[in-house]
Amino acid sequence: HFGHRAHGILLLVATLPSLLPVPLGLGAVLGPIVLVLGLGVALGLDRPWLPGWLRRRELSAELVDASVRKVEPWLLKLERWSRPRRLWLTDGVAGRVAGMVLIVLAAAFTLPVPLTNYPIGVAMILISAALIENDGTLLLWAYGYTLLMAAALILVWGGAVAAAVLALLPA
């Protein structure tokens, strides 16, 4: 029984393409998959569940292969560092928090906002790896990264929106 590890493996496969330089729209395809898988983690499901319409979707072999090639060196480093520890953070109620964070990240990932897929994808990959390895310490690092990344994106995009509004105001 794989538990959260099975969720983590599917999440990793679904989030790896976020690191590829692809046009907008990838989040609209992969975001719902991550959202449903995150919901499964949040609900504490023993194994991943996807609705039929998502199970029937296929990721191209080329996309998965390119994704793995791009991140393989980083994943190998992460795998050497990561190990089962602070299990209480990846199991039970605390483990469900990871699912809730993934739901929020997946919702943000689906939005067509330029320059956000990569940082959001990194956060989802870190959480996926933490779930695969049952590594509570890595999960804490993933949460920290997620908070910093969210703050940075809010500042950048909030500043851009504020500047656009100010530019539209009469002088």
Image (cartoon, rainbow, N blue to C red):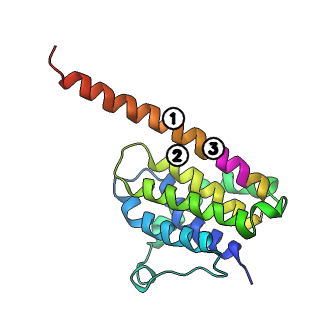
Mark 3 or mark 1: whose residue is earlier in sequence: 3
Relative side of 78 to 50, left or right = right
Residue 14 in the image, given as x and y percentages of width and height: 52, 67
Question: Tag 1's secondary structure?
Answer: helix
Q: Which residue position holds label 3? A: 145
Give me the C-alpha separation between circle 1 and circle 2: 10 Å
Determine whether 158 is above or below 60 in the image. above
Mark 1 or mark 2: whose residue is earlier in sequence: 2
Determine whether 168 is above or below 113 in the image. above
Q: Amino acid at mark 3?
A: Tyr
Q: Amino acid at mark 1?
A: Ala
Q: Amino acid at mark 2?
A: Pro
Disc 1: CA contacts within 10 A as few (<14), some (14-19) or many (>=20): few
**Residue at 45% across, 83% down:** 51
The range drawn in magenta is 139-144
Question: Tag 2's secondary structure?
Answer: helix
Q: Which residue position holds label 2? A: 119
Given this view, does label 1 or label 2 mark the residue nearer the observer? 1
